[in-house]
Image: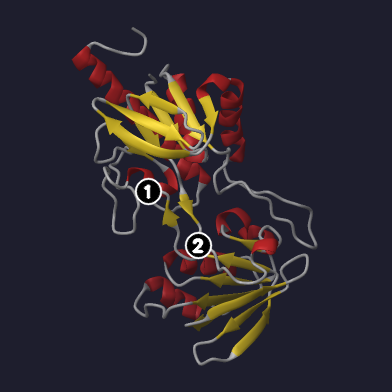
Amino acid sequence: MYDLIVIGGGPAGITAAVTAINRRLETLIIAERWGGQTTYMMELEDAEPHQVITGEELLSQFRQQLDYLDFCRHYDRVVQALPVEDHFSVVTVDGDRFEAQSLIIATGAKPQRLNVPGEEPLVGRGLSYSVVTHGSLFLGKEVAVIGTYRRAQLAALELAQHAHQVYLFAPELLPPDWPLVKTLRRTPNVSIYEGATVREVRGERFVEGIAVETVDGALLDVPVKGIFVKLPRKANSDLVRDWVDLDEEGRITVGLYGATSYPGTFAAGDVTHISEQVLVHIGEGAKAAIEAHSYLLAKWGETGNSSDE
C-alpha cells in the first residue's frame, strides 16, 4: 500500500508527487501523460513554432525526477477512486488496482470546444484555449475571443494590450454592471458582439478568420490571425463526485491547504478552480502534498503504523 496516490499529470499533480517523494512518502502518480492542458505547441504562419509555458523550467525539473524514478509513476487513466475502510482504492482502465492511505486529485478541467467546422485542424495553428500561454504571440494582430463571463472578459482585456484589434464574441449578454465589462466598453481596440454564435473557423493551414452569426441573424466574416476560446470549463471531478463536496459548478471544494471534505483526500489545480497559471498550480500541488504529509504524520501518530514499518 502506498502512502499517497496522486491522480493527474499536469503541473499540480507533478509538483505534488515530487514534493511527497522528497518528504519520503511512498508515492505513486497515475496519469495518461505529462503536462495536462498546458503543454501544446503554437505554430503561426509568420513565426517559428513556439511553446510558451510560464514556470516550464521549474516544472521540467520536477518531471525529470519522475522520469528517473519509474517505480513511482504509472501511465494510465483512472476510472475509479473510492474510500475503503481506512484507506483508498484506485482502479485504472487496464484493470490495475492500487491502494493508498491518502489521495491527491489533480485531474484538471476540460475546455469546452466550439464544435464547429475548422476548429479541430487549426488548434495550435492560431486557435488556442489559453491566453496565458499564447497571448503574447499575437502582438499587433487581429484576434477573436469567444466567451461571455469573467475568463473571456479578462482574456479580451489582456489581449488588448498586445493585439491591434480584439473582437469579443459573447454567446450571451454581458452583465452590464460588471466592472470588467465597463472597462471593455471603454477600451478602444475592443469590439463586442453580444448574443453571437460562431459558425466556422476559417483557414487552410493557419487561422485566417472566423464566421459568426449575430443576434439579429446577420452573418459576419471577420479576418483574424488568432482565436481564443474562453467558454466555461468543466472540472474533471467525476471520480470523487459521490463522496467529496463539490461547488455548484462541479469543482472540488478545498480548504486553504488543499484538503477536501473527506479526510485523507486533497485536491489541487484546475479541478478546484480555473486559473490556467502553471506557477499557481505548482504552488497548489506543493501545498496539497505538504498537507497530505501532515495528515499522514498525525494518522501514524494515532495508529503507530506507516509504510516504513
- Residue 207, given in percent of the width and then of the height, sits at 71, 68
For residue 185, above or below residue 26: below
Q: Nearer the viewer, residue 120 or 66?
A: 120
- Residue 134, given in percent of the width and then of the height, sits at 63, 57
Q: CA distance from mark 1 to mark 2?
A: 16 Å
For residue 157, above or below residue 274: below
Would you name the residue on which mark 2 appears?
112
Which dot marks residue 238? 1
Q: Nearer the viewer, residue 305 or 297?
A: 305
Q: Quadrant of residue 107?
A: top left
Residue density around tag 2, few if under 14, some if 14–19, many if 20 or more, within 10 Å? few
**For residue 104, side relative to residue 135 (left or right):** left
Amino acid found under the numbered disc labelled 2? Gln
Question: Mark 2 falls on what kind of element?
Answer: loop
Res 190 visible: no
Q: Earlier in the sequence, mark 1 or mark 2?
A: 2
- Residue 136, given in percent of the width and then of the height, sits at 64, 59
Q: Nearer the viewer, residue 286 or 253?
A: 253
Which dot marks residue 295? none
Residue density around tag 1, few if under 14, some if 14–19, many if 20 or more, within 10 Å? some
Res 192 visible: yes
Q: Quadrant of residue 4?
A: top left
**For residue 245, side relative to residue 140 (left or right):** left
Amino acid found under the numbered disc labelled 1? Asp
- Residue 160, given in percent of the width and then of the height, sits at 58, 70
**For residue 301, side relative to residue 187 (left or right):** left
What residue do we see at 47% from left, 29% from top?
Answer: 96
Question: Mark 1 falls on what kind of element?
Answer: helix
